[in-house]
Amino acid sequence: MSESQGKAPASSEEANLNKKLRYSSAVLLPALFLTYGLTMVGESVTQHGFVVNENIATDARIVHQMASVQQTVYRIAPESVILTVEKLQQGVVQAASAVGSAGTVAVASTGTASSGSTPGIDDKELSDRAKADNFLEQRKQELMAVAQSHQGASAIAAERQQWFIYAKSIVLLGLGMAFWGVLFRSMRMLHVSTAIGVLSLLLTANGYWLFVQL
């Protein structure tokens, strides 16, 4: 009689423990898997954003360098540059009528009439070159602004990606603890796994909204 009474409380405690384990694991495991999915989505999105912004910033810097080279050519050797196709055609016609075929070849190759006398640069040509220089300068400033903007965006994306990596590593630890808790029937492990899951969820939220920055 006493033996059966001693087994009853033990079986009752075991049943309560099994019930707690079932309820806890039924809530904890889906929550951890959901958090893991959020970290994976966030990491993928931020990685894509980092690559796109970095490519745009790189392209803008390359075009900025090209514009700088072109502007330097305008400033150092303006006579060697044909600003427009119309100016090239006009120069060829004028040179052909003035100095013949030799002048035509010179204009086609250098953009100025080459004859016995030194060619002059009219006011319109100077104005065109000044406009070209101003345009390139303005374009360089716009390109630099674009490069800096997207460089900043890529830096933010890289920081957000780091938070998602931290959260993913921690949530994987929480999943491991949860499985071990169920396997060894330990509520303590499940409690630790719950705390880890809350921490990983906070890190995931920070990856999306950057409440705290490194």
Image (cartoon, rainbow, N blue to C red):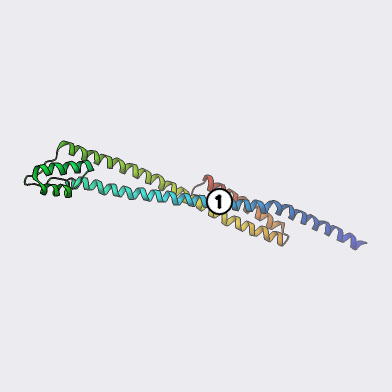
Q: Give percent across and percent down for residue 65.
A: 30, 49
Direction left: furthest residue: 116
Q: Give percent across and percent down for residue 94.
A: 13, 41
Quarter holding residue 166: bottom right
Q: Nearer the viewer, residue 91 or 189?
A: 91
The residue pinned by badge 1 equals: 41
Q: Give percent across and percent down for residue 56.
A: 40, 48
Give left or right: position of 168 versus 25: left
For the point 47% across and 49% down, which residue is it? 49
Quarter holding residue 18: bottom right
Quarter holding residue 93: top left
Amino acid, disc 1:
Val
Q: Is residue 18 visible?
A: yes
For the point 57% across and 57% down, which residue is it? 169
Q: Nearer the viewer, residue 15 or 192?
A: 15
For disc 1, the neighbor class at 10 Å (few under 14, some 14 to 19, many from 20) is few
The N terminus lies in quadrant: bottom right
Q: Nearer the viewer, residue 67 or 178?
A: 67
- For the residue labelled by badge 1, is the local secondary structure a helix, a strand or a loop? helix
